[in-house]
Amino acid sequence: MTKRYFVYPIFLIIFYILQYVSVPISYNGVAPDFILILLVVAGIRESEKFAAILGLIGGLLADYTAGVAFGLRGIIFMLIGYFLAVLASEALSPNILSATVSGIAAYILTRLIYWGEYLVVMGGFSAKEMFLSVTLPEIILTLPFVPLVYFLVALLTGKRSSDDSRARRIRRNV
Amino acid sequence: MLVIVLFLFGFMINMIADGGSTPPKTLVGLVITPVQTFFKNISDGVENFFNTFSEYDSLKEENEKLRLQVKDLEDKLNASSVYAIENQKLKELLGIKEMHPDYEYVYADIVSISTGGFVSKFQINKGSTSGIEKKDIVITSEGLVGYVSSVSPYCADVTTILNTNVSIGAKITRTGDMAMTEGSLEQMVEGNLTLVYIPKNSNITRGDAVYTSGLNGTYPADIRIGKIIDIEIEDNGLSQYAVVAAAVDFSELKSVYVITNRSDEVEDD
């Protein structure tokens, strides 16, 4: 179980560098949202507390570099991580398909919130322009990495800790 | 968790209302900026290492041929080329400094960039301890980059001229016409700006250079913004607008100069 305390932070650092520092993969200034991918994988595989903390740290890193209102991504990612972990312990099976579907849902949710942030801070914008110039290229770049990241994390961390959370919950209810 | 959410929400609202940096962001910056600089240097080193491999065969063959004949001359030629490029950049910067000899400049490296596509901004590894203040103008030898939107002791955020909320008083040097540049999402991804409020009787053409006008004192005058690459008629048919390719290649930007001692400030539009 302690492997995840090394694997996720290392992946978070590497993904932060890939997304904001060296940026080897980008199209017209848009790069894959690696931090969100890692959060989704953590939400499916780990406990609520772990996923929430990882989301908070990852979100604050993203806010520091790319955010307009510092703290917004920290809050969003923390909540996404927490509720995704709750859902995973109750209903989701840990596999690449559920990770991909969760990734799509998390991506849509975060982008809707970012659009709202942009609207409040920057003023009006063209939804068509925003979708074609930013959102569509980003989702095309991001989604292919979800299965790869899930596979790597599963390989390195082994058994998911959300199984333990569910077992504890069942024992308490019994 | 609720306490953390309320805490962050309060800082977020304060930042939106007041702008600039908040204590949590400053604290994060103190830790993150050295790490960013470190990994950026490693990343550049790795990139140069692999580039060496990809060009290894052709360079080796050329080196074998020239080494027997003019090796000493080749070394001098390579050195002088590097110096010539650097000399040209310094001359251009000196040109800016000669126009504004009273300005002082702080050199800074870019340590991270915003890749979300919503805003065009990046972070530099110098902050208030180097004399940088919020709303300082940022340039390179190629032209205008943007302004400092928030500053911490050892780092600062730079918002570029491509952003949709940045408007710049502009001048088309060939015709003398005054206009204004604005950013748009569609143009931002291609590194372009929109030139609006062009006089109806203006005879601008593709290739015309656009510089800052300095009229309202927001940006210094005579700093290159870019050149016109396309001209369109507005939907109302009464006026025209142009697409301007920014002089600065933001995708390749590695370092900038910050003008630190101007008294005028950038006004957010």
Image (cartoon, coloured by chain):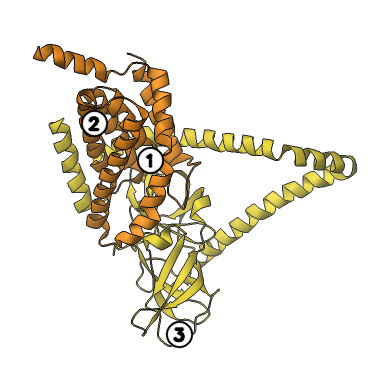
The three-letter amino acid code for the residue at tag 1 is Asp
Q: CA distance from mark 2 to mark 3?
A: 58 Å
Is A152 in front, or is A28?
A: A152
Tag count: 3
The three-letter amino acid code for the residue at tag 3 is Ser
Quadrant housing residue A45: top left
Chain for disc number 2: A
- Secondary structure beneath label 2: helix
Q: Are the residues flagged by discs 2 and 1 in contact, CB closer than 8 Å? A: no
Q: CA distance from mark 1 to mark 3?
A: 44 Å
The three-letter amino acid code for the residue at tag 2 is Leu
* Chain identifier, orange in the render: A
Name which residue lies at 77% across and 49% down. B77
Q: Nearer the viewer, mark 1 or mark 3?
A: 1
Query: In the rendering, what colour is chain B?
Result: yellow
Same chain for mark 1 and mark 3? The answer is: no
Quadrant housing residue B170: bottom left
| Position of residue B142 in the picture relative to residue A5 (left or right) | right
Residue B48 in the image: above or below residue B80: above
**Numbered mark located on residue B202 in the image:** 3
Name which residue lies at 24% across and 43% down. A72
